[in-house]
Structures are given as C-alpha cells and as structure tokens.
Amino acid sequence: MATNTAPSQPNSASQAPKDERVARAALSRLMEPQDASGLALVRLAGAVDALRIATGQLTAGPSLEQEMAALLLEGGGGSWPGLAASLKRWMPRVPDLAPERDLASIQRLGGRLIVPGDALWPEQLADLGLHEPLCLWWRGHELEFPPARRTIALVGSRDSTGYGGAIAGEFAYGLGQRGYTVVSGGAYGIDAHAHRGALAGGSSAVPTIAVMAGGVDRYYPSGNEELLRAVANQGAVVAEVPPGSAPTRYRFLQRNRLIAALAAVTVIVEARWRSGALNTAHHAESIGRVVAAVPGSIHSANSAGCHRLLREGGAVCVTDVGEIAELAGGSGEDLAREQEDPGSEHDGLTLEDLVLLDALPLRTTTSVEKLGTVAGLGQDAVRAGLGRLGLLGLAVSERGGWKRARKIA
C-alpha cells in the first residue's frame, strides 16, 4: 500500500499568514463546529484577535458585541445571550490549546491545515456564509479540491440493503469514470460503497473525499480503517476539528453541511424516515445545491426517506449516472443520454392500417376479399393499406395472396 508523503509547500503568495494559520488551528480546538458566536467573532475581529478575545487576552468593546448580535440575527441565529456567555463556555478548553502541537501532528501524517486565504481552500465552502468552517485538517494523496461542479455527494443509510449498496457503488464508479469526485462521510453502508466505487472507477486527481466527524489521525469507524487509508492514499480525508478530536453525534451532524457544500449535487441513495442523510439533504437545499434521491421499494424502510424527499418536492428522482451528471453540469454540459427506444412496428400506422395488420395471417396467405371481411374495410381500402404495409416490410404477397411478413432476428 502506498504511504503518504508530506505535500510540497506552495509559495507564500498562495498561503494565509502564519499567525492566521496558527490562530485558526487553535480556534478549531477551542470552538465546536458551527459555533455561531465564535464564527461571528472571527468574521468581525479576524482570527488572530478573535483568539485573543476568546482566551481572555483582549477585551472586546461594546461596538463589537453589537456587530456580533446583528450578524447573528442576520444569519438566523435568533436571540444571543452575549459574548460573556460564550467566553464562559470556551474557557475550560483554553488550557488545552496547543496549535503548534496540532500542526506538527498533521504534518507527521503527511497532511496539513488549509484555511481561507490559501489558494487551495475550497471556494464553494463560502456558500455556507457565516457557517463556513474555520479551517480544514487535510490528510491525503493530492492537495487539490475540485470545484463544486465536478463533485457529487453520495450519502445514505449506514445499514444499507444489498440494493442500496449496489446502486451506490455503481453510481460512484460511473461518476469516477466521468472524472467526478465523489464525497461522502466514510461511514458504514452507503458511504463505504460510494468510496469503494469511486476508488475503483476514479479518473480525477482526487477520486473521492471522506469528510470526518473526528480528527483525521484516527480512521473512524474502525471497521472502515483499510478503506479510509485507501481514500487518504488516493484521495483525501478531511475534518474541521483537529487531530485527536472524538467523533461525537453533534460533530456528525455538523460535518454534513461540509459534504453538502463541497458538492454541486447531493444524492440520497437510501435513507430511513429519520436518517442523518436527510440532514445532509437539508443543508444542501438551504444553500441552493441540487438534491437528488434514488427510488426504492415501497416496502423498504431504507427507502422511506428518499420517497419522502421525492413526495415533498425536495429532491429530483435519479436512476442512472447520466442523470446525476446532467444535474451537476452547466447548460448543455453532461446531458443524460436518452434511453434508446427500439420502437414498434406499429409506430406511425393509421388506425385502418393497424386493423389490417392485425387481420393478416402469419403462416398462410389470404385474399383481399377475406381481409376486407375480417378487417371490416372496403376492398379499395384493403389494397391501399396492403401497399403501405408492403413498403414498410410488414406485409408480403405470395402467389396472389397476402400474409404478415416474418421478423428477422
């Protein structure tokens, strides 16, 4: 198995300043993902001063608190108890802050920290607005995030059925063959099938990305360790929490917004009525991304969530890779191929010709007079119809009689 190597450093013009990087590394350990108060503080004061305020080294003025309250209200955060409550909440974690240690840990893993301002920062995460992550801890083979239009999220039930697993693998393989990156959550079930399919069929520099709820130093769940190592070696494993962080339930829910934001289309392959995959779909819809769902058996509880999305109009029905690629592409790009229709021998026939064709025997010939009686048509109409059917290869004349032409296999 290939091993990770430390990525080459881009030139300084493509990187955020070192103090900004260190500050965001510290803040990612101090604050939980999608901590609205902390993200508002960073947005208004900058990461360096936000860290000083959050750790009690700098006092925030009343004007900053007013701006934070306004920003949180604008972002739908509702009432805000004030900065003092947030400072009290963060304070127990301050003694454990050691950003240089965390940065050294990620470097030993062959990865690095990516922050806004880096040339390598995924621009599509800006669509999350105030809830854009502070940073991404990255561990992978290539340091390159594809644009949203070349990325598809495939997610679904952890207890996937054989049907769901096969569909996820087939879709991921087909998308990989088309040069798309498949992003998922590295979990059991649909996520795992999606990553495997993308690794098998991937033709892009980053065939698949796994977004973790915990630190990238530990592959979780442990049963997927070998798979996630393969993802890291050929694609990328990322998280917004630093090495050593545990994958809590809250962090699982918050990482779903990153999966949705990284991709142009989020496809729900299988989902129960109350599935975490529906949370990903909600995040995708809230930032204007396309949501698609795969239909399943009406008797399968694992497809109940997909059918719910389709019934409520929150998702587009998809049944093949071409339809997903069409949703991701711009106007005229990656259009799904129309299903080839072999057509029917009846296509284009008039009602009289259809009646006449049905009256023609298959094995023996018959006369114009008998055809007129069986079809209920005049002899002139029968002769004209036989001429048309003959030209179409549907009727043949033998020894003065007529019969239906045999199909050649």
Image (cartoon, rainbow, N blue to C red):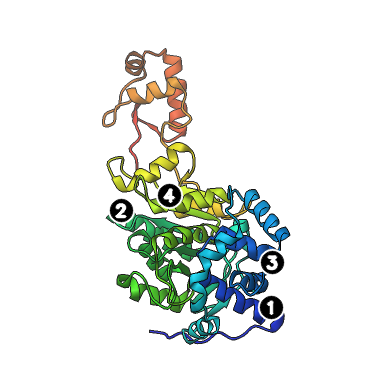
> Mark 4 and 1 residues: CB-CB less than 8 Å, in contact?
no
Q: Percent from the top left, x then y, of residue 142?
A: 53, 78
The residue sitting at 56% across, 54% down in the picture is 328
Position of residue 158 in the picture relative to residue 9 (left or right): left
Q: Which residue is mark 1?
A: 14
Q: Which residue is mark 3?
A: 45
Q: Which residue is mark 2?
A: 163
Residue type at mark 3 is Ala
Q: Which residue is mark 4?
A: 278
Tell me the element at label 3.
helix
Residue type at mark 1 is Ser
Tell me the element at label 4.
helix
Q: Nearer the viewer, residue 270 or 107?
A: 107
Query: Gap in Å between the C-alphas at discs 3 and 2?
Result: 50 Å
Among the two numbered marks 4 and 1 on one chain, the one whose residue lies closer to the N terminus: 1
Among the two numbered marks 1 and 3 on one chain, the one whose residue lies closer to the N terminus: 1
Among the two numbered marks 3 and 2 on one chain, the one whose residue lies closer to the N terminus: 3
Position of residue 178 in the picture relative to residue 124 (left or right): left
